[in-house]
Amino acid sequence: MKMEDMPLSGPDNTKLEALVHDIYSELVEDACLGLCFEVHRAVKQGYFFLDETDQESLKEFEIVDQPGVDIFGQVYNQWKNKECECPNCKRLIAASRFAPHLEKCLGMGRNSSRIANRRLASNNNMSKSESDQEDNDDLNDNDWSYGAEKKAKKRKSDKNQNSPRRSKSLKHKNGERRIQTSEYNYNTGINYETLGPDEVRSFLTTQCGVISEHTKKMCTRSQRCPQHTDEQRRAVRVFLLGPSATSLPDAEAVVESDSFDIPDGQTLMSRLQWEDSPDISPADSASSKASTNHSDSRRPKKKKRTPLSLNAVGGVGGGGGGGGGVGNVTGGSSSSSSQSNISLPTKKKRPKLPAPSISSTYDDLN
Amino acid sequence: MSKDTKMRATINQKLTEMGERERLKELLRAKLTECGWKDQMKAHCKEVIKEKGLEHVTVEDLVVEITPKGRALVPDSVKKELLHRIRAFLAQHAS
């Protein structure tokens, strides 16, 4: 005990000391009362006994410490392995892949329409020589075929390459988009080397047959294919079948030669002087699409025919016609327009062609 | 006697006016909580409440039960500290 605490003076101090104690007592009582009020309020409000729960509740909310489970006892990847059955295709799909699968399966959503359009476009590329249009429709409608999707992706490069060409062909065909430029149609061209002469002949009677410079394949379009001129077709026939063995023009040549016999030598002469030909004859006015110049429609046939007809007729003009054909130089004066229609291949082939015929006709004449 | 009473009144007044009383109160509460007196008292309260029933316990019941026990359970160190402070105040401000 400290000396300070002890009262120093006598009677006053006792009073003072009593006072001190009184003050102290007051303070302690105050503290007790405060506690009582606090507890009483807690009891009446109902939060006094919160820390005391029964055993059953304690067990229920106990912290879980098992592997594969969180502290509340829940499994976190419960839905990972669940599979859902697609209402459209009846397949079992993993839950996390279900939404994208539905998008494609039902054909809704941005991606699926994009893919479908792409497939449609690339199917157009390959549709010409492949399966029927009906098959293609089936393929396009069935969004569900993965194979077609893969094909579409592979052919995408083809589609891109072809687009300028395709728009060109669109003009001719009035929006019919199924027809594809034959030159780019790698799978559908015919290689003339593989065909026998009879096959070539039969092929050439029905189809264009012009050999593409890029691929060395023959065009499989019709005789009126806009891609190639009649001149080209004639040249190809000559090239493939030989100068005297052209199938199509042969038949017509026979007919036409008969018809020209009548008009006779004068017209023949005038015709023969022309470079390329006697195309412009009043009798023959059939025009095909290919010819861009005036009434040069039947040129290929006529051109081929001229030497032949000359051979058949044996007229004087025959050699002239052949000579006119050879000499582009001489032809300059006459129909220059027709001259412009001569493409290189024909130019090359022409000299060979008329040369023997010229010699033969002259021989005949002589 | 009246002098004594007067003196007491004066000191009390001073104690309150100067804020010493509040300070002492806070000091006491802190010390009692620190030494565990409060928890002890609360446990005793629970017994009383269980005895009397949760619904029917009144403030008076608690006061009557708690106060004497509380007074007795105050640790000596706390008591001494407080007495010291009161005396110091009196010595300082007594007329």
Image (spheres, rainbow, N blue to C red):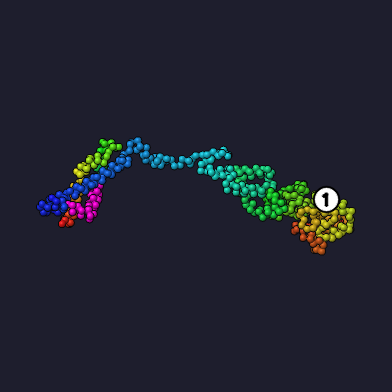
Based on the picture, tell me whether residue B18 belongs to the magenta stretch: yes
x%, y% of residue A330? 81, 63
What secondary structure is found at the residue carrying circle 1? Answer: helix
Name the one closer to the observer, A101 or A312.
A101
Q: Name the residue rendered at 75%, 58% in the picture.
A: A343
Q: Name the residue rendered at 62%, 50% in the picture.
A: A156
Q: Name the residue rendered at 64%, 51% in the picture.
A: A159
Chain assignment, label 1:
A
Q: Name the residue rendered at 27%, 44% in the picture.
A: A37
x%, y% of residue A142? 62, 43
Where B70 sits versus B4, above or below? Answer: above
Where B88 sits versus B61, above or below? Answer: below
The quadrant the C terminus of chain A occupies is bottom right
Based on the picture, tell me whether residue B20 belongs to the magenta stretch: yes
In this view, the residue farthest toward the left is A10
Name the one closer to the observer, A60 or A95.
A60
x%, y% of residue A32? 23, 45
Q: Residue A147 falls in which quadrant of the image? A: top right
Count of number-bearing discs:
1
Mark 1 highlights which residue? A252
Give, as a single range, the part of the protein colored magenta: B8-34
Circle 1: residue type: Glu
x%, y% of residue A258? 87, 51
Where A335 sits versus A80, above or below? Answer: below
Q: Residues within 10 Å of mark 1 (few under 14, many from 20)?
A: some
